[in-house]
Structures are given as C-alpha cells and as structure tokens.
Amino acid sequence: MPNVAELITEHVTLTVDCVDRLYLNAYVPRFQTEGGVMAFLRARGHAIPSPALFAQLTTDFKARLRAWVQREHIPWVEFQKRERKDDVVQRYRDRFPGRHGVVCVGVAQEKARAWTATKDVRGRHVHFTYRWKTVCVNHDSLYVVDREWGPGFLKVCGYVPYTMKLCLNGHEWAKRQLTRRRIPFAPLDNGFQACARPAVLQAVCETMSAADLQAVFDRWFPRLPLPLTVADQAAGFGYQLSLLQMEVSRTQVFDRPLCGREFFEEVLRDQLDLGRPDRVQLLFDRKITRATPGRFRTRVITAGVVPSLHVEDTRCHIKQSCKEGRALRTETTLNDTYDFGVGRGLRYLRLPPDPRAAHQHPPAPGRAGGP
C-alpha cells in the first residue's frame, strides 16, 4: 500500500483551493451603543426614547413578512426541535423551478443578544436605560437561490438591534463563474471533480472579493420585508458586513476512489501508536438505534463508514474528510479573525494566489489518466 506522500504526489489529478462556506454578520454600527438606540428612537419622532416603538417595529415586521410570503406563494416552514434544517430546506430547493428567488422561509427559536429597557420615573420625568441581554426569540431565515451565489440564506432577528446573518458558499459561486465563462467542469459534492481549464478555475476562486459579498447583500436588502427599511439606512442606520465564520478548503481529487480510503488507512495507522490518541472518530452514514439488527463494533475502516480527521486549536478547526470517495477535502474553519491578528471587516478579506493550487496533475505511469 502506498504511503501518504506517494498518494498525494502520484495519485492526485486536480487540486483546488477555494473559500467554502462564509457566514457573515450584518449589523447596524449605531445600534451597538445605548446612545445610538436612543438616537434612532428620536429620529422616528419620539421625544421619549420608549422601547414601545421597538415592540411595534417587531410586530409590523412579522405581519409584513407573513403577508409577503402569502402574496408571493412562498412556503412557510416552522422547524421542529432537533430537526436538521438543511435536510428540510433541501426538499424545497429540489422543487424550486427558477435560478433566482426565495425558496422558503423557515422559523426557529434561537438565542440572540438584544437591547432591553429599564424604566425610571423621577417626578414628572420618565427615563429609560438600555442594556444588553441574551434572549431566546424567533429568527426568520429566508432561504434563497442567488443568480451569482446559488443556495444561501439570510437569518433575520426581528428584535433590536435587528442583526442578520448571511450564509454563502464559495464553491457554488465559483461554479457559476465557470458556467458564465462556458468552461466545462465536473461537479463534486460542494466542489469540483474535474475541470477543462484548472488554472482558470483557481484564478476564479482567487478573484472572490469583498465587493462580491457586499453585492449579494445589496441585491437582496431592498426586495425583502426586513425590520429596517431603505429609509432607515439613508438616515444613518445602515448595515455593515463582517466575517463571523469562514471556511477555506483544499480539494485534492484522486485518480481512483480506492486512494481516498488508502489515505485515511495510512493516516490512522500512523496515529494509533502515538501515545494512544484520545479521539479517533468514525462518522457513520446511517442512524443506529437499539432496534437496528446486527452486531456493531468499531474498526479503523469498514464499509459504510466515512472517516474524518479533526484538529482543534482555540477557535480554529481543521477537518479532513473524503468527498464521495474521490477527493480529499481539507477544511479550515475560522471562527474569530482576531486569532490571526486581523479585524472582522470585509476589507480584511484577502485571497493571495497559491502557485501549488488548481493544477491538473499528470497521471503516474500505469495509472488511469483522469477522474
């Protein structure tokens, strides 16, 4: 059996570096301070900055959202506890006929950081003090298909400070860029299995910029019934985007599926004698219950098991897995950009070229000539 180095150097036909999942935070800078909250209330014509206006805005937002969903005939989904949202939404995506639009709206209760007010009456004067508090409230997720980014969603919290989360996928963006350039490629689960022009593919992945991320947000903001309006944005209460979570990945496609299993067998074998590692995990691709017949035992590699390797350091997580039995996927998840000495703003997003990436590897003598 070849070792890890031989598998990578002799049996990889395509290597692609690309941003994978992006989780962006859309926030209103002026809502991050108590003074900004009061300024918003006064701008709406309230001499006393009462939180009653926020309750009214939340109620109006919920009503406008439900009316808009009914008018546009968009499915409304209420997620159940412990239900995997992606699996539920995928059924609606499979039936969605267009290439651009809202697939469905899903509602689930989640924790959020919101402003709460305390009333203080001093004689004839009424004063409100605002402070941060963690609350558990409903979030409305608008699942969309974007013409530039493909599947994604915008999660909206209808409570002040009206924070939103935008989730996108860099591989889906790259696929649409290649399609626009009419460059043939073979897709892989959230990636690429082959490409007629691999150098162009890597160049496309490296051209993703902060402007592309801002453009997709600006494209959807005016057309969705959100708590804050375009008029609020013009009055100085506009949204800014920041990096909440970012995944960067390297996909290495093997010339034959067996190489992926050989890779993990060699890696696991190398690690088993290093001081008895406390965590060697295997992910089963089916649910095992007490009613499932048969005997189960843990083996390093067996049929029906997807191996994965995990490395964790502070708020950074590195994972290696096998995609469809054909490619080695190495994903690095960044949960806080400050771990790397940079801020969270989009201006810090940089994708420097990597000369090792996105090239078609010549097959080794005697091996298959491609994926």
Image (spheres, helix red, strand yellow):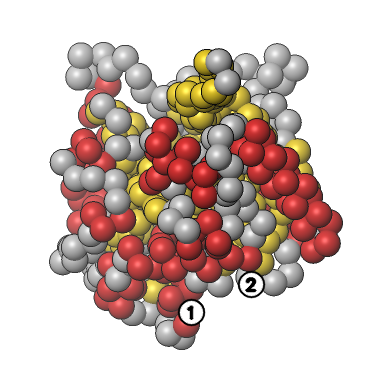
Q: Is residue 46 above or below residue 13?
A: above
Q: Is residue 205 left or right of residue 40?
A: left
Q: Which residue is mark 1?
A: 179
236 or 199, which lies in front?
236
Residue 104 percent across, percent down from the top left: 72, 54
306 or 72, which lies in front?
72
- The quadrant in which residue 294 appears is top right
Of labels 1 and 2, earlier in sequence is: 2
Query: Which disc number belongs to residue 99?
Result: 2
34 or 203, which lies in front?
34
Label 1: element kind: helix
Quadrant occupied by the N terminus: top left
- The quadrant in which residue 139 appears is top right
- Mark 2 burial class by Cα count in 10 Å: few <14, some 14-19, many 20+: few
Q: Is residue 233 above or below residue 266?
A: below
Query: For the point 77% across and 58% down, which residue is it?
Result: 68
- Whether residue 322 appears in this view of the structure is no
Query: For the point 40% across and 45% down, which residue is it?
Result: 30
Query: For the point 16% across and 41% down, which residue is it?
Result: 341
Label 2: element kind: loop
Q: Amino acid at mark 2?
A: Arg
Query: Which disc number belongs to residue 152?
Result: none
Residue 201 percent across, percent down from the top left: 34, 73
- The quadrant in which residue 210 appears is bottom left
Residue 352 percent across, percent down from the top left: 18, 63
Quadrant occupied by the C terminus: bottom left
Q: Is residue 311 above or below residue 238?
A: above
